[in-house]
Image (tube, rainbow, N blue to C red):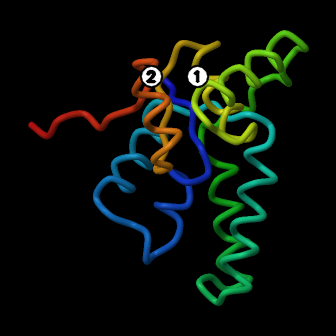
Amino acid sequence: MPVVLDVSATLSWLIDDERDDLAIAMANAVVAEGAIVPGLWRLELRNALLTAERRRRLTQREVSDVLNDLQKMPIEIAASPTPADGEAELTLARTYGLSLYDAAYLDVAVRRAVPLMTRDELLAAAADDLKLRWHPAPSP
């Protein structure tokens, strides 16, 4: 089953000093099952990578390589929200104290009835409340 993937989860496996066992499990799950992202993910991700480059956490070449590698992953861009979906995003943002950007990820998870993969604590708490938070499979 695919997951909704947010930028905090994505960055955790892309940037060396953020990579841990959970990040690796997240990357493996996306490769195996696929992911769904709202359209804003592309812009948000590129902005975060550019910020990492400016802070010398990544080189320009590494940013290019990462973007090329991500294009090969099974990541689906969700259709733009309808006006009714936009209202749902506002409701989720208000209910859980989220930014509208984070509520967009949660809304995709709700509409698709799939787990949300995030490293953001507030967004994770909202996904937990809705029983939509992704958790890694237990180790055998």
Q: Please, what secondary structure does the residue beneath circle 1 have?
A: helix
Which circle's residue, 2 or 1, is located before the other in the chain? 1
As drawn, the label of residue 132 is: 2
Q: Nearer the viewer, residue 114 or 73?
A: 114
Mark pair 2, 1: CA separation: 7 Å
Residue appearing at x 51%, y 51% in the figure: 9
Place residue 129 in its image quadrant.
top left
Q: Residue furthest right?
A: 83
Seen in the picture, residue 76 relative to 30 is either above or below; the reply is: above
User: Please, what is the three-letter code of the amino acid marked with disc 1?
Assistant: Ala
Quadrant where the image shows the C terminus: top left
Depth order, front residue of 31/129: 129
Q: Where is residue 113 shown, x and y percent of the image?
A: 53, 13
- What amino acid type should be assigned to the residue bearing mark 2? Leu
Residue 44's place in the image compared with 47, above or below, is above
In the shown orientation, is residue 39 left or right of residue 74?
Answer: right
Mark 2 nearby-residue class (10 Å; few <14, some 14–19, many ≥20): many
**Residue furthest toward the left?**
140
**Label 1: which residue?**
109
**Image quarter hosting the N terminus:** top left
Q: Percent from the top left, x then y, of residue 29?
A: 40, 39
Q: Which residue is drawn at the image coordinates 41% and 46% (left, top)?
A: 26
Image x and y of residue 109, in percent: 58, 22
Q: Residue furthest bottom?
A: 56
Check contact, mark 2 vs mark 1: CB within 8 A: yes
The answer to whether 59 appears left or right of 87 in the picture is left
Residue drawn at x 74%, y 83% as measured from the top left:
60
Label 2 element class: loop
